[in-house]
Amino acid sequence: MSVELATRLIDVLGALLLFSTLLILASGQLFRAIYAVAMQSVFLGIAGAVLGAATGNPDLWVIAGITIVVKAILLPWLLIWVVRRIQIPREIESVIPINATLALAAGIVVLAFRLSASLGPVRQAITGNALPVGIALILLGVLVMAARRTALVQMVGLFASENGIFFTAMAVTQGMPLIIEIGILLDVVLGALVMGILVLRVRSSVDTDIADLENLKG
Amino acid sequence: MASSLLWLTPLLSFAVGLGMLLVRDRRVLATLDVAGSLAVLGLTLAITNRVVQAGPVGALGIFRADHVAVLFLVLIGLLAVAVSIATVGWMRQELARGHMRAERLHYYYALVHGFIATMLVTVLADNLGVLWIAMEGTTITSALLVGFHGDKHGLEAAWKYIIVTTIGISFGLFGTVLVYGAAAHAQGGVLAGAMNWSSIVAVAPHLDPGIIRIGFIFVIVGYGTKAGLAPVHMWLPDAHSQAPTPVSALLSGALIKCALFGIIRFHTIARAACGPEFSQGLLLIFGLLSVVVATPFILAQHDLKRLLGYHSVEHVGIIALGLGFGGRLGTYGALLHVINHGVTKALVFLVAGDAIARYDTRDMRMIRGLMGIAPLAGTLLLMGALSLAGTPPFSIFISELMVIQAGLAAGRTVVVAAFLVVVVIIFAGLIHHVGQMVFGTAAASASREREAHLPMLGMLLLVAAMVLLGVYMPAGLDRVLARATEIIIG
């Protein structure tokens, strides 16, 4: 695969990744948000494969495969399992209304592109627009977590944010060392399990959303 | 031999934790806990000895111990020992009061040792990716400990803790990726060990300053969240106050220092790549903000453990200020403050846990006359509070003085003035709170049980370190601190 083609594909995939996070922000239904982050993870896996073909680095193929298995299948399945198990209301509770969130999101994307346009020669080391897209994805993930008061959607925001990091990491020359990527993914899975346990324990004892608890103040 | 110690130390702690899962007997668990911690302290001292004798040592291409790392390493070892000794008596009380269920004890002990193991990996990591993985590992293990009791408050605190620090340190990972990308670019391709701190520092002057700046901003926000720097400290008072007392001591004493260690590693890179002004300026802003933001919450606080949590925010701020003022004195003072605050805060959390158990409340307005019913605990609480407030002859006074001197030497008069005002206010507030708890007459309902020996032994160990460092600087520690300062400021 030629470098130009890879760059163009990465830019298209970057746009799709951004679009997926916007879908999460715009969704008022829990399942839509979960499907959107699963779709985003598939795009991330494809990006890994594209970069693997372009650079000839076999590690990237492995990372792409693990990403799809863990982030597009395992974690969304975990979220859906939790939802089914405890009969959570399917509507997402917002702190900031959806329209306002989307306006904020547009601002964040513009900011991320302007920030990375100011960078020097090192930009050449990163394929296409992976850097501004990565920064935008991370900040948009935080926006999801801040704007929604449903524990599982906050987890979805976290996964979307992490997808941004992985995207930039893949595009940084040849990606991080394989063993490090695997270690990070292991942390992501363990962290998600612990979060799932906490959500279940609160549901089973006081029957509210854990993100709704606000007893600790001052 | 020496290099295998680097991976043996965390592995041992991890193995002790796994082994505990198989044990059901309470006494065996407590013995394993103390023995495991003592072994970790012994190994960290052996590593320190080796580093002092023959310089930094690496292992497996991902671990490395230098003079900066051993400071944090010994702090973790020392606190592990003191806390596990104190846990023996604490656990007896908790079981008697029904706060802890006997059949779940092995999970508790195993998680504590897993937590210690991940902290050890954090400070021993040379590879910045491993540093991050271990740091997230500390979040996962300690979040389970924060919510261990399973009550509503504990679960709320655990949720806030894991969700906020996980998203926080994912910023740290992004910063790591950017710094790694810059290093790979500067080296003209990915070489072996390109993600290692030691090899990145070696090429740091040739790194692209633009990308390092963005990378450092992400790192200080990310690892700063984990360290409890304002304005991203919101989770800290919740988590540190809701955790079981020995865990609070480890969280406040050791864990937030591990996050600072991560910031220090990147600070060293950023100093060399874009000059000292940039990263020091950011550290100053976060440091001053932490000290200022913590003040009103300390004054208005009624919950004893939350008070101590906000106090940790203040002290992390002081360490950041020391690093931000920079120079030899500021950096040296900041590193000394890491040790001093770690020791003192662990002590005060343990004593506070004892007082809370006696009065069966965390409300400081209900705790009166501790000196009368538990003279030793009362004295220790008073000493710890005086030390935290920065009075001589305790250790924190020395390091705070160094930080202030460094600020004046750097010409940051306004920052120093603001800092002094806040420290005086906090001094008054803390002495007011603690004075009322220690003196006066205790309510009839307070437990007048005789003071148990073992928890006191753990606390006395910390008091000894606190007083010793206040009046005397051991030559060995001074050498390590001086060398660590040189490593950081180049």
Image (spheres, grey):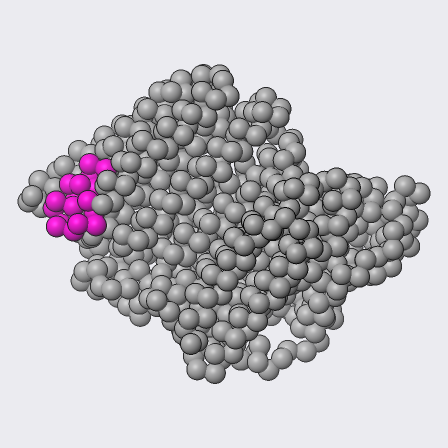
Image coords of residue A125 (percent x, y): 19, 53
Identity of the residue drawn at 17% across and 41% down: A49
Identity of the residue drawn at 82% across and 47% down: B358
Q: Is residue B238 left or right of residue B280?
A: right
Q: Is residue A43 left or right of residue B62?
A: left
Q: Is residue B69 left or right of residue A156?
A: right
Front residue (pair A139, B292): A139
Front residue (pair B253, B402): B253
Position of residue A38 relative to residue B24, above or below, is above
Image coords of residue B32 (percent x, y): 62, 59
Identity of the residue drawn at 90% across and 41% down: B445
Which image quarter holds the C terminus of chain A? top right
Position of residue B191 relative to residue B425, above or below, is below
Front residue (pair B351, B270): B351
Image coords of residue B412 (percent x, y): 53, 63
Which image quarter holds the N terminus of chain A? top left
Q: Is residue B370 left or right of residue A7?
A: right
Magenta highlight on residue B293: no
Image coords of residue B9 (percent x, y): 49, 65
Which residues are drawn in magenta?
A45-61
Q: Residue furthest left?
A: A2
Q: Is residue B400 visible?
A: no
Identity of the residue drawn at 45% across and 22% down: A83
Q: Main secondary structure of the magenta part?
A: helix
Instruction: State the image quarter where residue B243 is shown.
Output: top right
Magenta highlight on residue A57: yes
